[in-house]
Amino acid sequence: MAALQDNVHIIPLGHEYDRAVAPFKKRSVDRVYILSITKNTGKYEDEMVSRQVHFTNKVFDFFNNEKKIKPIVREVQLFDLLEVMKQISAIIKDEQAKGNKVQINMSACGRKTSIGAALAGMVHGADVYYVSAEDYSLNNSDFLEHGLSICKKGETFRFENFEFDLPDDVSQKILVKLYQENRGIRSTELRDYLHDNGVEGFETKLADIGKPTKSIPTSEGKSVNKRAESITQNIKLEKKYLGNLEASGYIQRKRSGRNNIITITESGKYVACIGGQL
């Protein structure tokens, strides 16, 4: 028997309250993630962080006290677009892997954060919605009670998803490796990385094994010629992965002596973060 599907909401939270909680005055929810800045790392003004903590606690208390659900609070640097996409994508993939329905409120945060939230949601097929405001806070008292927006009705607008053509799973792994290393990587290092990750066609690890013509025992007990195997792996790496990634503008390559050095582009960083593998 299939498990029941949980209704999961992700709320990247700025200086808002009504926009975060209004949809749930009449709706049920099984699990809530609040993404927020809850401590000052020296990047922001103390007053900004203090107000952020106020709204984080206020939204937390609503779900904890009124909906009887303890939200999961994640510390996320909401002004970092890549970080926002990385964190939201990871949550979506984890919840979807459990068979749950994921919805994202992209209206309870700042503009840059809302862009990252919407993109991450659409890439992974989550429902992205916007909570409409009837008015805006014009004094400090209203601001502390409602946040920047006043939303009594809780009317929501659901965005229609469209398909994003992400690279295949192995190509995403390559981008993740380049993103995490944050440096140029030789193709030989990428081949070893694909070997370590069990990618088909890279079963034989060529690093640190004698001369180029030396025969190498495989896991099946057979022997292969190192030079021939190296050529075969290079062709597969080029034709199936690197060529497509370069054509899409996600990587750059340059020669350094006898080696190809591969680096990730800014576009590639977006794909690495939004793929959900980080």
Image (cartoon, grey):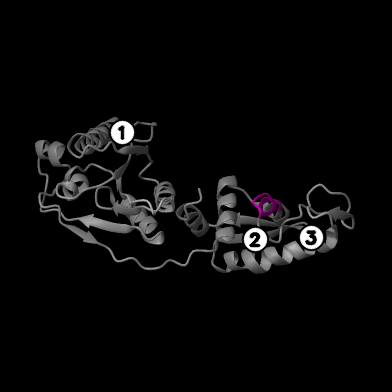
Q: Identify the residue under disc 2.
A: 253
> Residue 170, how many percent across, how many down?
59, 59
Q: What residue is shown at x 37% (from left), y 58% (from top)? A: 119
Q: What residue is shown at x 70% (from left), y 55% (from top)? A: 191
Above or below, 13 against 256 in this view is above
The residues tagged by marks 1 and 2 sit, at their Cα atoms, a distance apart of 41 Å
Asked if labels 2 and 1 touch by Cβ distance under 8 angstroms, the answer is no
Q: Earlier in the sequence, mark 1 or mark 2?
A: 1
Residue type at mark 1: give it: Glu
Q: Pointer 3: residues within 10 angstroms few (<14), some, or many (20+)?
A: some
Q: Viewer-nearest of labels 3 and 2?
A: 3
Closer to the camera, 96 or 134?
96
Residue type at mark 3: give it: Ser
Q: Identify the residue under disc 3.
A: 230
The answer to if 195 sits in the magenta stretch is yes
Q: Identify the residue under disc 1.
A: 45
The answer to if 130 sits in the magenta stretch is no
Q: Earlier in the sequence, mark 3 or mark 2?
A: 3
From the image, which quarter does the N terminus lie in? bottom left
Magenta stretch, residue numbers:
192-198
> Residue 109, how many percent across, how many down?
27, 47
The residues tagged by marks 1 and 3 sit, at their Cα atoms, a distance apart of 54 Å
> Residue 50, how many percent across, how many down?
26, 31
Name the element at disc 2: strand
Q: Earlier in the sequence, mark 1 or mark 3?
A: 1
Name the element at disc 1: loop
Closer to the camera, 255 or 274?
274
| Prevailing secondary structure of the magenta residues | helix
Q: Residue furthest front?
A: 1
Q: Quadrant of residue 130?
A: bottom left
Closer to the camera, 186 or 211?
211
The residues tagged by marks 3 and 2 sit, at their Cα atoms, a distance apart of 19 Å
